[in-house]
Image (spheres, grey):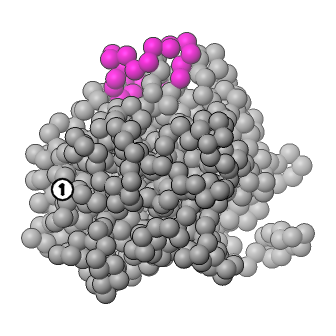
Amino acid sequence: MTMFHDKGRIHNWPYTVRYGNEQRVETDVLVLGGGIAGVWAAIAAARCGARVVIMEKAATVRSGAGGAGVDHWQWAADNPASGVSPEDLTEALIENQGGYRNGISTYIQCASAYETLVEMERMGGKVRDTDGEFRGAEFRDDASKLLFAYDYTNRFVIRVWGADYKPLLRKACKRLGVRILDRTAATGLLTSGGQHGGRVVGATGVNCRTGAFVVVKAAAVILATSRPQRIWTFSSELRGLSTFRPPSDAGNGYAMAWRIGAKLTMMEKSMRSAFGSAYSFPAYGSGNAINTWYPCNIIDANGKAVPWVDCNGRLLESVSERCRPAEGQKFFIMGGGSSSLPHPGLKQYLGPKPIPDLEQRMLRGEFSPPFYADLTSMPDSERRVIWGLMVGNEGKTRIPVMKTYMQSGFDPDKDMLQTYDFLRGSGMREPVVPQERTFGESGVCGGLLVDWDLMSNVPGLFGAGDLVFGGQDHSHAAATGRYAGARAALFARRQAAGELCAEQIAREKQRVYAPLAKQGARSLDWKELNAGIARVMQNYCSEPKNDELLRLAQDWLMDIEENEAPLAAADNPHKLMRTLDVLDILTCAKIITEACLARHASSTHLHFNRIDFPSLDPPEWHKWITLRKGSRGTEIDDMPIAFWGGLERNYRPRHRENLEAMGKK
């Protein structure tokens, strides 16, 4: 009988266990991952007339990094009040990352984020200030009733009431006849004839409650399983929070794509992250002037206001000035002192922020810690939009911060919230040690290499959202999911049904169930295995890298794969899913190490330090490094930094075809 432990007590597993049982499903488009990108992909594909199935390891109603809510809709350059074109904004975002941002998916986002948001509005999502709650505020556009964040002059980031967007998206999926396989973790991709690199014809999964094996045959598959977490840091008991995105994002899509020969790129990028630190604070749960809290006043312990400056170093006298470009600056991307966006070296995109030498001036006695975010001194509309709308709709803050703090007596009209600058850390962005890293936690990161159809080099395999290389944030997931869903549906429409390979399915089934047979004294828990992988990455693939360190990382990871991973054991379907997650984390760690070995130059924008190749961003290495698993080992290649060509001419015909297929003009 399957058991599980809870606070020292042993209980029977509450679901009927069906190990070995097979559920067979056939569809046109299969979406792996039911987060924001996944549900948008399913909706678009269904509107194109395709039969659609979503496979999601959690519950689609709230799963994914954006499932709990969203407070601002990024880079909507296509909205009617925007002062920046999609082309200009895309180029700025790419330049801000030194070229290492996906021009394809970023342009899809900048050119259709607002169009996607309007569709969200038709599903019942609140997008506009229809009740006039913020009438008269300078961030409100009276014609459209949209509310804007950050740059009030150019208006391309929209504040939204997004707490219920995910449930509304799930309802839309159900109305359109999308079949949702919740609590079903995808485990592997199936190819025509079982051939490596062959056309994708489906995928396998395992039910996280019953343990039943699921086989889905499909003409096209969309990977929307986000980016891997828990590569460098993992300690569920001691830290609780060691990732910004959901810790269940284990890189499953990366590992599945890798095993069948799909190309990945920018896998060498990782960076220090406060969310990988044992000392981190809840995101946006301490006072700051970043992101959701922008442009909040900051004061010291004596009530002295911390000055703000623009990108030219000019002191700003009012809150209003913090939301306007500097003299000679066309627009800014974001402000408030974020370390990753925009890049400090690109002055033309830097937004206003508190004085950068605050720490030095504090040490000289000019300011006295601790510091506080002072909403009480903000203009009324700014205070209400930060605490009421943004903190109230951002998924990571609606319950743990706003609801909890208010129930405890916090009143933004009267109280201030401490910021943890210089008390070991700074709320969101405190300095951390080199091994406290994450894979693209802040900013863009590596992932699946895709073309203008958002299809990989493996026919029939599409990507959307955070899994696609060089993209980020909620509206990117929504816009690319919507686009990929239509492209996949059109691809499926033109394809004859592929044939599943019984031998390939049998091999995957054997791999999936292997941990069930590993009980006993020599078995290994999934948490211990994850912690061991993280320790190897901390020791040998941290900030300073050279050939010797990276080869030691490879040796240790190979040793874990050959001698420790086979001991990983599971005694119920949930632990089986967690164990398979860690095996995928191991695969991702190996890919990252190989990518680091392949880049023979250091890079500021990639946060990449090869001490045996200290030359920083040499022109000959300003390119994408691609990796794929070939029949004889890893194949390394490269691509020009702007390989995607013209943005509008590549995007517009496909977008028009997508809209026609979805029944839109």
Residue 124 pos. (x, y %): 32, 83
**Res 172 quadrant in image:** bottom left
For the magenta stretch, what is the residue range? 609-637
User: SS class of the residue under badge 1?
Assistant: loop
Q: Nearer the viewer, residue 411 or 342?
A: 411
Q: Quadrant of the N terminus?
A: bottom right
Q: Nearer the viewer, residue 572 or 152?
A: 152
Q: Is residue 152 magenta?
A: no
Q: How crowded is the residue under tag 1: few (<14 C-alpha within 10 Å), some, or many (20+)?
A: some
- Going by the image, does 651 lie left or right of 195? left
The answer, for residue 388, to whether it is visible in the render is yes
Amino acid type of the residue tagged 1 in the rendering:
Gly
Residue sitting at 13 percent across and 47 percent down? Answer: 648
Q: Is residue 526 above or below residue 117?
A: above
Residue sitting at 61 percent across and 59 percent down? Answer: 303
- Going by the image, does 485 lie left or right of 618? left
The answer, for residue 213, to whether it is visible in the render is no
